[in-house]
Amino acid sequence: MHIVQTVPELSTASGGPSYTVTSLCDSLSAVSGLELSLVTERHTIQHNYQTSGAVRRMELGGEGGRVARSLSVAYGHEFSRFLTTFPADVVHVNGIWHPVFHWSARAARRSGAKVIIQPHGMLEPWSMAHQRVKKRLAWWLYQARDLALTDALVATSEDELLNLRRLGLRQPVALLPNGVHLPDAGAPNPERNVAMQVAARQRHMLFLSRLHPKKGVELLLEAWAALRPPGWMLTIAGTGDAAYLAFLSERAQSLQLGSEVRFVGELLGEAKWRAYRNADVFVLPTFSENFGVVVAEALAHGLPVITTKAAPWNSLGIHQCGWWIDVGRDPLIGALQQAISLDDDTRSEMGKRARDLAATFDWRQIAESTAEVYRWLAGQGPLPACVSLERE
């Protein structure tokens, strides 16, 4: 069975889907009976995320004048030819709004393939309101029709599933969370062990995500300025729009945070994992999140997590490994105060429970469930337990 995954780009600057799509493709390539292709648009943006050799990688389109490039017209033509050369059983479209998603869904329907659309949070209320005019135009031109004609949708949380139903989407919805690459819990961490031997070592609060207004970084800066906890450093890791980065830097200066906050830019590979290992608490005060891969990564590294009820992580409270708070400055200040006041033993116990929770998001298990959805759509398997056929 040939599965085609589509996404416009695989850049670290574009947020979570680039990371999760490549991780899922690699995990799916190990599932028996599946042939995987990952198709992106050809352009000047660097494709930072790579996949294993078992995944066919294709870059299409990118040619033509300015208007043609902005509408991804060449991509649409080449994707149709690709499906003629490599017929697909299922085309998994990872996102909405961008023309690449429209052409992918359109070509897939015409080829006879089953179509899955995974919005990746792009239909959540906050995201729908952001850049509203452009999205209303896209909705009218093609997006409403693409969603209406898709064979199935994918949600990464119960909240996202309910929001899809509230929009009137009646198709089957597969509830498939994103995964996390689990570190070796038994491996020693010499950096942290040495640091722990220093009685008065500086502690670290870590924010790591794409720097975007919806992530709540401004709230975090304000809350940190209100607390100014002695012996603690707030590290903000990530990249984003240059103008927004400049705004955040200016905001930190206006709050006179100085050396209490450091912006370290984008962290990839080992630098990213080192940041998790050297942190004491992770914080993501987001306004909207359909999953929050960085939360799962932080849990996998044994970090207590603070995030908001705009992210689907009520399990933090259930498993006693973090704080699931209302969006806002005051709730964030309260959670930060509690996290900062933890003693080492309590923080360690929370870390153990965090790792146990993260283990439920193993990519291998998620790939198996996703493959069951593909088989069912292609008429080669029974209805999976993760698929909701109607509004609940």
Image: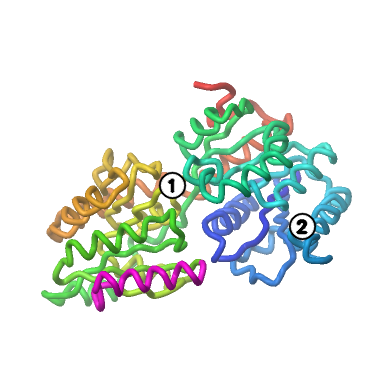
Residue 171 lies, in percent from the top left, at 64, 28
Q: Is residue 237 above or below residue 105?
A: below
Q: Residue furthest front?
A: 133
Q: Residue at x 46, y 34 (%)?
A: 158
> Quick check: is 244 in the magenta stretch?
yes
Q: Is residue 219 above or below residue 43?
A: above
- Distance in Å between CA atoms under marks 1 and 2: 28 Å
Tell me if 108 is positioned left or right of 32 in this view: right
Magenta stretch: dominant secondary structure: helix
Residue 308 lies, in percent from the top left, at 33, 46
The disc placed on residue 23 is none
Q: Residue at x 56, y 51 (%)?
A: 131
The disc placed on residue 72 is 2
- Residue type of the residue flagged with mark 1: Ser
Instruction: Please provide the residue range marked out in magenta.
Output: 241-261
Tell me if 206 is positioned left or right of 180 in this view: left
Out of 19 and 119, give the one closest to the viewer: 119
Tell me if 304 is positioned left or right of 268 in this view: left
Residue 188 visible here = no
Q: Quadrant of the N terminus?
A: top right
Q: Residue at x 27, y 61 (%)?
A: 222
Tell me if 157 is positioned left or right of 24 in this view: left
Residue 150 lies, in percent from the top left, at 70, 34
The local secondary structure at tag 1 comes to loop
Q: Sort mark 2 into few (<14), some (14-19) or many (20+) by Cα contacts within 10 Å.
A: many
Q: Which residue is mark 1?
A: 288
